Amino acid sequence: MPDIANPELAEQGLNRIEYAWTEMPVLHSIMERFEKEKPLEGLILAPCLHVTTETANLMRTLKAGGAEIHLCASNPLSTQDDTAAALVEHFDVDVHAVHGADRDLYYKHINSCIDPGPNVTMDDGCDLVTTLIQKRKDKLDGVIGGTEETTTGVIRLRAMAADGVLPVPIIAVNDALTKHLFDNRYGTGQSTIDGIIRATNILLAGKTFVIAGYGWCGRGLAMRAIGQGSHVIVTEVNPVKALQAVMDGCRVMTMEEAAPIGDIFVTVTGDINVIRREHMEKMHDGAILANSGHFDVELELTALEDMASEVKRIRQNLDMYTMPDGRRLFLAGQGRLVNLAAAEGHPASVMDMSFANQALCVEYLKGHADELDTEVYPVPADIDNRVAELKLASMGVNIDTLTPEQEKYLSSWEVGT
Ligand SMILES: NC(=O)c1ccc[n+]([C@@H]2O[C@H](COP(=O)([O-])OP(=O)(O)OC[C@H]3O[C@@H](n4cnc5c(N)ncnc54)[C@H](O)[C@@H]3O)[C@@H](O)[C@H]2O)c1
């Protein structure tokens, strides 16, 4: 039995799912093939993903391929209740997701999706596989493999493999070029700005915008913040990434140096306690804090709570923390991924590529899982290339092909100066 907030939101959800579909031509073409070939017939899937309109279109694609689906949320604040309702009412998907679910309900939903005995897991942050290993070993037997959507999940899965506890092969969808070069960079870049603006309605032009972490997400975010007229400061722990930020025109310094001068602070590192009490103590009145990394551990929220003499929700996704000295710090989206908590996550056209990889990797696992070990695998290169080709075709963009002479030249060593 599905567990959703309100079935009456189904029509609204359907409209938004169909609208997102117009921007997802790659997934659309995969669905058309899946409908004819039914490559996922007999497969039980347990996706633990952000329950958004784009995910809904992935679910309808997987269902068209013949899969049975039990969907739960990968974050309690990103669930769109209307999308969940539409998936149940219009697409006959078993959904267990309620916006704002507390920790107990969140894990109850994950367990509900494990109960039917999945063959393939689809994680975004690795909470479902972690639950399987720690609490539900009884359901491991039928699992042939899984996929992982995000950087943080891939890090956790590699740690499991290193500890010898990873139970099944996992494909790191995050690491596909057609995923992280686009989703993490352009998707997170745009949607994080969107989340901050929706939560605060702040003008970015002229503001000092501090970004912790200059990975794929941080780079995309910096690009968009600069485009909005902000002065971008980057903090990093990796010297190469820091150097890249300098060459890209950002100021690079420590968080301690950035704390008193930043107007907006965003963490996007996948790390823990990146902005801590000692930094918050130095921030000026009105500073805004947000996180776009996967877990809500990048800002030291316990310290923020502890320091404040008063905490007040002043807008839908904005909490004001008043300090005993009168300074007010504003926290967007409760420190959870701000693009999903305060906005709608990535635009559909970028999720089109990430989710095309997901759909094709599930199909790949069905055909190849028995050839794989219990390791974290990259997305097969031909899937990555196929997704790029389909996306280019949908955009009407043609590219050149190598002539036989060029192919020979590029694979030989004899020709020199
Ligand atoms: N908001 C979203 O929708 C979204 C989308 C994709 C990924 N993510 C998440 O965002 C996070 C970053 O992903 P990514 O793909 O950019 O990862 P990445 O590995 O490419 O980059 C992370 C960067 O953070 C830096 N870093 C680590 N600890 C730091 C610290 N204490 N201070 C400053 N910098 C530090 C690392 O050196 C690295 O350059 C992950 O948690 C990932 O799961 C979120």
Image (cartoon, rainbow, N blue to C red):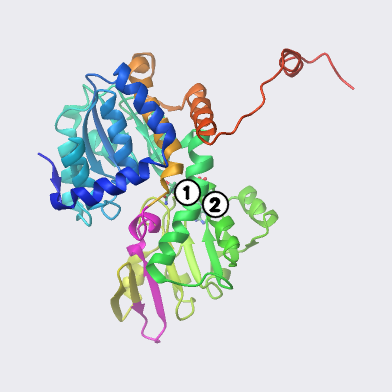
Q: Nearer the viewer, residue 335 or 130?
A: 335
Q: Is residue 31 magenta?
A: no
Q: Which quadrant of the figure has residue 42?
A: top left
**The C terminus lies in which quarter of the figure?**
top right
**Would residue 129 be visible to someone looking at this image?**
yes
**The N terminus lies in which quarter of the figure?**
top left
User: Compared with residue 371, is residue 81 higher up or lower down, i.e. above or below?
Assistant: below
| Residue farthest to the left, as pictured | 1
Residue 317 lies, in percent from the top left, at: 32, 67
**Would residue 151 be visible to someone looking at this image?**
no
Q: Which residue is mark 2?
A: 220
**Residue stretch rendered in magenta on the structure:** 321-344
Q: Is residue 339 magenta?
A: yes
Quick one: SS at disc 2? helix
Quick one: SS at disc 1? helix
| Residue farthest to the right, as pictured | 417
Please name the amino acid that badge 2 sits on.
Gly
Residue at 40% from the left image edge and 56% from the top image edge: 339
Residue 9 lies, in percent from the top left, at: 18, 52
Please name the amino acid that badge 1 sits on.
Gly
Q: Nearer the viewer, residue 415 or 190?
A: 190
Q: Which quadrant of the figure has residue 66?
A: top left
Q: Which residue is mark 1?
A: 187
For label 2, the crowd category at 10 Å Cα-Cα, with few meaning under 14, some 14 to 19 and many 20 or more, is: many
Q: Report the side of 307 relative to 223 (left or right).
A: left
